[in-house]
Image (spheres, grey):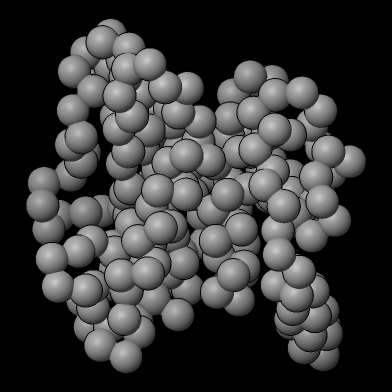
Amino acid sequence: MRLLVALLVSTLLIHSLLATPHPSPSPALAGGRRGSEALGFKNATVYDISVAKCAGCGALGAWAESLEFLYYHNLVRLARWELPLAWSPQLQQYARWWAAQRRADCALRHSFPEGQFALGENIFWGGAGGAWRPGDAVKDWAAEGVDYSYAANACAPGRQCGHYTQIVWRGTTSVGCARVVCDDGGVFMTCNYYPPGNAVGERPY
């Protein structure tokens, strides 16, 4: 009975979130006022959910960056009626390790050999001269959604959509990310997901 009530409340909350266009939350998360008072009501709800699921995010600076990663992921998931992700310090630690490996070259390279992903993984590179915040990476990955066909369960010919489908993968419950400024001034960001998504032959939602 409790589970049924919880699902009903979650459905009503998500419907409420989707009913109104979301104002841009970037100023609140990238600097200036922080917290739900700096956001529109709908985005504030997603923000508060993300704060609650961001336990163990770490020190203040890392916490703000971690929350920004989580917040944008959960905005994308709620648009597909998926439950929000929780932040994983273990996945964050792994992502930090890989980001540190890329500091010297900022190469857009995965931490796993092709086809041997033990975790889900999205990577992003932004060139020197740009601020490149966590929201930029997640929005870039989410933009692939226009190239995903649910009917065919495939990307449009010649296009990528795997970053998007990993974000909205129904079975994924946690995420951990890292951002590093590379030696050449560029920015490398990586997020890891568990359980991993993009299983062959399965739909994301």
Query: Residue 150: x and y, percent?
Result: 35, 84
Asked if residue 33 is positioned above or below residue 90 in the image, the reply reads above
Query: Residue 167: x and y, percent?
Result: 44, 60
Query: Residue 110: x and y, percent?
Result: 20, 41
| Residue 148 visible | yes
Asked if residue 96 is positioned above or below residue 162 in the image, the reply reads above
Q: Quadrant of the C terminus?
A: bottom left
| Residue 58 visible | no
Query: Residue 27: x and y, percent?
Result: 70, 33
Q: Nearer the viewer, residue 119 or 169?
A: 169
Q: Nearer the viewer, residue 108 or 99?
A: 108
Locate residue 64 relative to residue 43 in the image: left or right: left
Task: Please tell me which residue is depicted at 39% across the width and 76% down the height of the picture.
Answer: 204
Task: Please tell me which residue is depicted at 41% across the width and 58% down the height of the picture.
Answer: 143
Locate residue 123 relative to residue 172 in the image: left or right: left
Locate residue 91 relative to residue 103 in the image: left or right: right
Locate residue 110 relative to residue 182 in the image: left or right: left
Furthest toward the right, the residue is 37
Task: Please tell me which residue is depicted at 69% across the width and 43% down the height of the picture.
Answer: 25
Q: Nearer the viewer, residue 120 or 41?
A: 41
Task: Please tell me which residue is depicted at 82% across the width and 90% down the height of the picture.
Answer: 1
